[in-house]
Amino acid sequence: MTATADPSGVLPLDKAPDTSDLVMLSVPHLHCAGCIGKVERALNALPGVEEARVNLTLRRVTAKASLPPEALVDALANAGYEAHALDTGIVEKASDPMGRDLLLRMGVAGFAMMNVMLLSVAVWAGAPGVTREFFHLISALIALPVVIYSGQPFFRSALSAVRARGLNMDVPISLAILLAAGMSLFEALYGGHHVYFEAAVSLTFFLLIGRYLDHRTRAAARSAAKELSALEIQTAQRMEDGRAVPVPLSDLRVGDEVLVPTGTRVPVDGDLLSGEAVTDRSFLTGESRPVMTARNEPVRAGEINVGAPFRLRSTAVGEDTSLRRVARLVEEAENARNSYTGLADRAAQIYAPLVHVLALVAFVGWIIASGDVRFAMNVAIAVLIITCPCALGLAVPAVSTAAIGKLFSLGFLVKSGTALERLAAVDHVVFDKTGTLTRPEIGLQAEGFDAEAQSVALALAQQSSHPVSRALAARLSHATPADVTDVRDVPGCGVEAKLDGVPVRLGRADWTGATGEGLCLRIDQTIIPLNQEETIRDGAEEAVAGITAQGLSTELLSGDAEAPVSAVAQDLGITDYHAGISAEEKHARITAHSGHVAMVGDGLNDTAALAAAAASVAPSSALDASRNAADVLIMRDELNALPALFTVARKARAISYQNFAIAACYNLIAVPIALAGYATPLIAALAMSTSSLTVLVNALRVRRVK
């Protein structure tokens, strides 16, 4: 294949061989079924694309194609969609083996519980001796394998705690299940009147419900640091003897000369060797407009080249680049957040040792009092079952699940298991500006911008990958593009062509012959200004006012310039605002705050701050890394429901405390009865189930929050 010269005067990288492979793209602005069809049609129409499929939930496109990712990104840009290439080897595939395993074990336990209960009803109804013993043995054949299989999550956790010479909630749970099953087997083999297989199985079933509910609240969380790494390109074009040679990113060294083609990410930090460069650095600064860089000025890894190809001299590679530094900040923040101890875990640290002490006291006390080891063991098992933290284990997951369902109906997707607890403690809310509180748009003047002008503007905008051109193409998607010829993309300036022999231009004001700044359309001698604007996102004013009304302070941090940041802050009534803030500075301000901070942002430059905040929220249109760093996603375009997020979180925390109180009151009543020997393990199991159901019913009250 013959290479053609590019404007930089060097030979570009030859195309990769046509080998079919999977290409994964992040497309943050997918919203509906119409978007799915438009994106899939745009990609499937490309020669070399076998199949393209959209995942609306993850805002991702997976394509089987022999084309480089850049070709697919350009095709989507022409269709009006921003896209970013992801490394399929780094991004983990969406799967939930643990959830499926818990569901299977829970289903087996539930089925077995119903069958053992049916046999027990016959025994309770007064079945005679031989029949009773036969039913006991059948119950044993059903219950014992189920207990061994379905109880594995608790047994493994308890064993790990014991090996570490510690206790957790699963130690008394495992003891209660195993002792109930073991003592029941002993009674069945020796003709005892009472066995408790239904207690062991029902205990396992209810506890698996709590474990699965807890798991589901955590299952959606994925590492934002890995998503940032996935955005890093894996190869670069190193200049060797005047030619661009593809090399793995790991082979680059400080001092190497690197070519950055149009539309690709800068692979390393470096100083610009070319005359000028135009890059989109919203990843680092949040600034919504492309930035012009002059010779010898620095460019950083992660920026996107939206102008002509340029060359740089690398000054930082590998772990020292800006992209990796932000990824490290995110990873450190994620690790700190993962160390947060939930309410149930904190309660278990006190509760678990107390349960064992009570059971031991009951066993020793009744041996001394009665001399009957068998009776003493039954009392100890009853104490273990009655004090079994089933209600405690359900207290938080049940409330979390109900609250998450309520928030989903309001347009929020909660991803983290402890997010509600952290949101309830928030006293300060930090907002990003561009893409969060505002929407970048193209302002179209009514005068002169008739159907013909719109048609010409759309035809030219579709020929450019510039972010402003993409926004304009999306704004004019209703129009029919004009039949233009001799199209030429002038990097850093705009796009020019001819319409029936008449010159037309779309680009910078000075390039089209106009005065001032902004985007202009020129048709022959007529110039029409198309000003880039930012509009306040629907519901943003209500969101800020509602949050302030709850006693929370607000702050605006943006990488954009002082003027637009000040204007948005004044419009929304935010008095504390700061402009020109980088990703590292956002992270530093969040971590330095003395209170509990919630971060609301959408850009890659917000990722470290989102991960570092006590709680974080991102619009669903955010890039993958930002969505994964956030605890909560806003699934609707408007923000007016945002105050409800904090209201529901606080109510959920209050109901969780109520559930702990219910569990404590239940134990205050039931434990003395069990210690006195008046509760068999069967009665203990029924009491335990009643307390668990009470907790579940109380948890549903969170859905009535207005």
Image (cartoon, grey):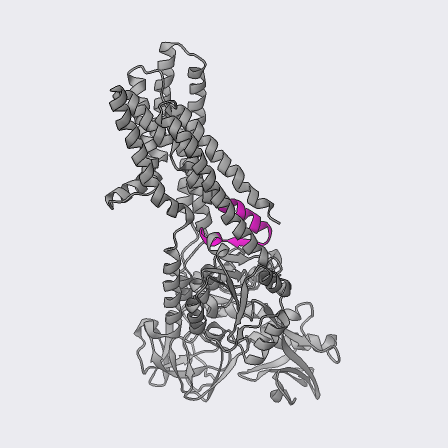
Residue 89: tell me if it is visible: no
Q: Position of residue 168 (x, y in %)?
A: 32, 43
Q: Position of residue 215 (x, y in %)?
A: 43, 46
User: 92 above or below 150?
Assistant: below
Q: For the point 52% across and 62% down, which residue is it?
A: 618
Q: Quadrant of residue 482?
A: bottom right
Q: Nearer the viewer, residue 280 or 126?
A: 126
User: 278 above or below 50?
Assistant: below
Is residue 222 found left or right of 82 in the rendered image?
Answer: left
Q: Nearer the viewer, residue 208 or 314?
A: 208
Residue 599: tell me if it is visible: yes
Q: For the point 44% across and 37% down, which residue is it?
A: 663
Quadrant in the picture for the N terminus: bottom left
Is residue 41 found left or right of 261 in the rendered image?
Answer: right
Q: Nearer the viewer, residue 83 or 105?
A: 105
Looking at the rendered structure, the number of numbered marks drawn on it comes to: 0
Is residue 505 found left or right of 149 in the rendered image?
Answer: right
Q: Position of residue 52 (x, y in %)?
A: 51, 59
Report if residue 470 lies within the magenta region: no
Is residue 627 found left or right of 456 in the rendered image?
Answer: left
Q: Position of residue 241 (x, y in %)?
A: 33, 85
Q: Quadrant of residue 154?
A: top left
Span shown in magenta = 400-420
Report if residue 406 lies within the magenta region: yes
Q: Nearer the viewer, residue 172 or 70?
A: 172
Q: Quadrant of residue 473?
A: bottom right
Q: For the point 53% across and 47% down, which residue is it?
A: 403
